[in-house]
Amino acid sequence: MTTLTSTKQITSIGKLLSDETRVNILTLLLESTADLCVMEISDAIAMSHSATSHQLSKLENAGVVSSFRDGQTVCYHLTDKQVTVSIRNIINNL
């Protein structure tokens, strides 16, 4: 039987994965061996810089990705939090 906490976690993961753009970003970051900057991500998924940043912000707020600045460039990588591990397992098993 699932607890209220695990039910909320499942719902949270479902919401994150309900957007195709976020799934594309997550897949790209999962397959990358290095951190990726917003411009690299936006080019790879063929979306505007603004739209990509918006989706990355949602992923960062959920604790799935983390960002850092390199000069004027913002780069992202996946976190090691449990939610990220769960998402990685879901995407890798599809």
Image: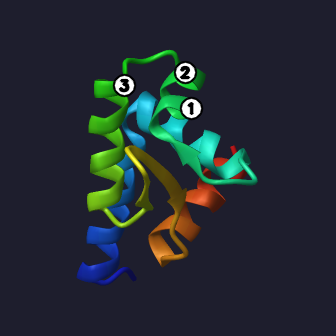
Give the vertical position of 10 relative to 14 (above or below). below
Instruction: Classify mark 2: helix, strand or loop.
Output: helix
Circles 1 and 3, Cβ within 8 Å, touching? The answer is no
Instruction: Please tell me the numbered disc located at residue 43.
Output: 2
Instruction: Please tell me the numbered disc located at residue 62.
Output: none
Instruction: Classify mark 3: helix, strand or loop.
Output: helix
Question: How far is the residue under mark 2 from the one under mark 1?
Answer: 5 Å
**Residue that label 3 marks:** 49
Can you give x and y, in whole percent of width and height, for residue 49 in the image?
36, 25
Residue at the extreme front: 71
* Residue type beneath disc 1: Glu
Residue 35 vs residue 46: left or right? right
Give the vertical position of 61 relative to 72 (above or below). below
Instruction: Classify mark 1: helix, strand or loop.
Output: helix
Name the image quarter holding residue 77.
bottom right
**Residue that label 1 marks:** 40
Q: Which is more toward the observer, 31 or 41?
A: 41
Q: Which is more toward the observer, 16 or 43?
A: 43
Circles 2 and 1, Cβ within 8 Å, touching? The answer is yes
The quadrant the N terminus occupies is bottom left
* Residue type beneath disc 2: Asp
Can you give x and y, in whole percent of width and height, for residue 28 in the image?
63, 40
Sequence-wise, the earlier of marks 2 and 3 is 2
* Residue type beneath disc 3: His
The quadrant the C terminus occupies is top right
Give the vertical position of 70 relative to 66 (above or below). above
Q: Residue at position x 48%, y 76% from top?
A: 81
Residue 56 vs residue 91: left or right? left
**Category of crowding for the residue at label 1, using alpha-carbon neighbours closer than 10 angstroms: few (below 14), some (14–19), many (at least 20):** few
Q: Residue at position x 73%, y 46% from top?
A: 31
Question: How far is the residue under mark 1 from the one under mark 3?
Answer: 9 Å
Q: Residue at position x 30%, y 84% from top?
A: 3
